[in-house]
Image: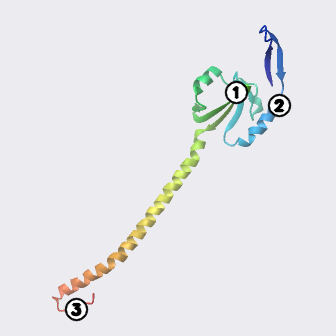
Amino acid sequence: GAARGIYNQTTGEMSGILMIEMDHRLFLKQYSSLLDRNSIYIIDQNGTIISDPDENRIGLLYYNMNKFNEIFRASDNKVIKKSGIEYLYSKCDIANKNWIVIEEIPLHELSQPLIRINQMILVIGVAVLLGGSVITVAASNSLTKPISDVCKKLDVIGQDGLARSERI
């Protein structure tokens, strides 16, 4: 839920509190299809979790917002080490609600597809290199064979003292 003070516009005094109770699962349905190897949750301006796939975390003060704002400054994403593992944190401010959607994903999960692509490029490169070498050797043999045959026949003629003739 959410609560907000209602103030008298003339005096500035608090007239009351508006409280809205809503099931966080409405939010969870919106972003649960995006959950795979990442974690997505919503916090309010105080750092309290208001929506999370793990219902036990709802209501926890998860962030010291001064430190949170210092870490992110003007950026919407940051690499942060947590429990010895680097995570990419992304945040999206929902300005009219004073809520922040946070996504965290282990950095190695993001780099895995790039590593696989790099390995495939390497395998393809080696295969092309080997195939090119085979084609080069075959082409070079077919181009130099007639010249080599002529040289051998000339050597035979030279050894026989020009007493022999060869068809070239």
- How far apart are the two marked residues, 3 and 2, measured between alpha carbons? 104 Å
Task: List the residue tagged with mark 2.
Answer: 23
- How far apart are the two marked residues, 1 and 2, measured between alpha carbons? 21 Å
Q: Amino acid at mark 2?
A: Asp
Residue 8 in percent (x, y) is at 80, 11
Residue 97 in percent (x, y) is at 74, 26
Q: Is the residue under label 1 in contact with that under label 3 (CB below 8 Å)?
A: no
Residue shown at 49%/55% (left/top)? 122
In the rendered image, the quadrant that contains the N terminus is top right
Question: Within 10 Å of the Cα at label 3, are there few (<14), some (14-19), or many (20+) other Cα atoms?
Answer: few
Residue 99 in percent (x, y) is at 71, 27
Q: Is residue 108 left or right of residue 39?
A: left
Return the residue found at the far top: 11
Q: Is residue 6 above or below residue 83?
A: above
Q: Amino acid at mark 1?
A: Ala
Residue shown at 62%/20% (left/top)? 66
Residue shown at 83%/29% (left/top)? 22
Q: Secondary structure at mark 1?
A: helix
Q: Is residue 94 left or right of residue 74?
A: right
Task: List the residue tagged with mark 1.
Answer: 95
Is tag 3's residue or tag 1's residue first in the polypeptide sequence?
Answer: 1
Q: Amino acid at mark 3?
A: Ser
Question: Within 10 Å of the Cα at label 1, are there few (<14), some (14-19), or many (20+) other Cα atoms?
Answer: few
Q: Secondary structure at mark 3?
A: loop
Task: List the residue tagged with mark 3.
Answer: 165
